[in-house]
Amino acid sequence: MSTLITNVGELVTNAPPDVGPGSDGAGGFASISAAALVMEAGRVAWIGPASRAPAADHIVDARGRAVLPGFVDSHAHLVFAGERGEEFAARMAGAPYRAGGIASTVTATRKATDPELRAGLRRLVAEMLRQGTTTFECKSGYGLTVADEARSVSLAAEVTAEVTFLGAHIVPPEFDGDTAGYIDLVCGPMLDACAPLSRWVDVFCERGAFDADEATAVLRAGQAQGLAPRVHANQLGPGPGVQVAVQAGAASADHCTHLTSDDVDALAGSSTVATLLPGVEFSTRQPYPDARRLLEAGVTVALATDCNPGSCFTSSMALCVALAVREMHMTTREAVWSATAGGARALRRADVGHLDVGARADIVMLDGPSHSYLAYRPGVPLVAAVWRDAELAWGSTG
Ligand SMILES: [Zn+2]
């Protein structure tokens, strides 16, 4: 069955700027006004002006509203138990954020049953879908035993293909003072248990977590088992994370809040995406990363939520777009590109993040005429309908 969405006020394609009349390419962002789109068999089958739209089995009248690729959230920690609302409140009252807060979520996660973890995970996945996220990455990292990490990646694999093994999130309390012993566990039995269900290996390379040598050892061990690397880098202060990521050929260095000129140059000369997570700076009241410096150096920038119970408990890509525009001086086009096509680059996915013919028909219709409404109307639930694989997955088309 084919579906035509017509009378689209603005169709964001992120396609090359030569697609269709009136298309407008800026930094990879592209859109067509007064447009239409046909989807069939899970894919985009046709895009062009509404005046030339072909027939279809089912017709949706967008009535001038904007249609975008579904958001690609390339960084999220969704398998956990408990919550840390009091820690957030204390932080807003002046207490500092420290990586050690992760340990309280580890304790709660270990105690939780599989059905409890699955219910929490599915609630967050549904929440993301309602907000227009159609592709997302999901990390382990709150189990930190072989059994608890294995069940974390197993639960994540129930809801996404983008599963990341993050055994090297922090050193758990039972390995206090024995980081080398914990790295041996992560690179040995824990990786053996998690690799079959994971696509990615990640490490928190930060003071208070893992240093450059430890991080490199984890990434190499993961790569030896067929996993592709990504790195939590330079969040809390300057450090080796970005260099470790680039040297490992990581798909993404995430956070990138505290960068030297060498870090920026290394990213610019690599295929490693800088994934910025402005919800974290919002929720920890820290300075935002310098997105303009990265963009002007030619670095590919993605935006993601980092949804987790400690440093940033939002699942809203629209909030990240609004923060990127207001606080990081990204243009609305740059921010929407980074939240869609940029996220796809950070996951090395060619089938999502854009709406060319042949792309996966993962599509969001906004209650607004332009992508800019995501930043112009912050905090407002603007997602009217979401299609995944050409099927209406949430919302209504009326
Ligand atoms: Zn994270």
Image (spheres, rainbow, N blue to C red):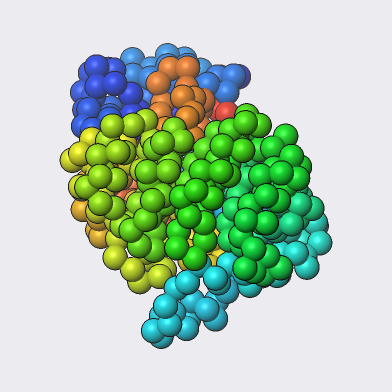
User: In which quadrant of the rendered image does the N terminus lie?
Assistant: top right
- Is 110 located above or below residue 11 in the figure? below
Quarter where residue 221 is shown:
top right
- Is 22 located above or below residue 331 in the figure? above
Residue 136 in sight:
no
- Is 358 located above or below residue 283 in the figure? above
Query: Which residue is rendered at x = 24% and y = 17% of the image?
Result: 18
* Picture coordinates of residue 219, whole percent (x, y): 55, 40
Quarter where residue 375 is shown:
bottom left
* Picture coordinates of residue 289, whole percent (x, y): 29, 56
* Picture coordinates of residue 58, whole percent (x, y): 54, 24
Q: Please indicate whether residue 158 sits to the left or right of residue 129 in the image.
A: right
Label count reads: 0
Query: Which residue is rendered at x = 33% and y = 24% of the image?
Result: 15
The residue nearer to you, when weighing 355 against 391, is 355
The residue nearer to you, when weighing 246 against 378, is 246
* Picture coordinates of residue 109, whole percent (x, y): 71, 64
Query: Which residue is rendered at x = 46% and y = 24% of the image?
Result: 350
Quarter where residue 339 is shown:
top left
Q: Please indicate whether residue 376 sits to the left or right of residue 243 in the image.
A: left
Q: Please indicate whether residue 357 sits to the left or right of residue 48 in the image.
A: right
The residue nearer to you, when weighing 353 against 255, is 255
Query: Which residue is rendered at x = 22% and y = 27% of the image?
Result: 25
Q: Please indicate whether residue 332 sits to the left or right of residue 271 in the image.
A: left
Residue 116 in sight:
yes
The residue nearer to you, when weighing 33 against 250, is 250
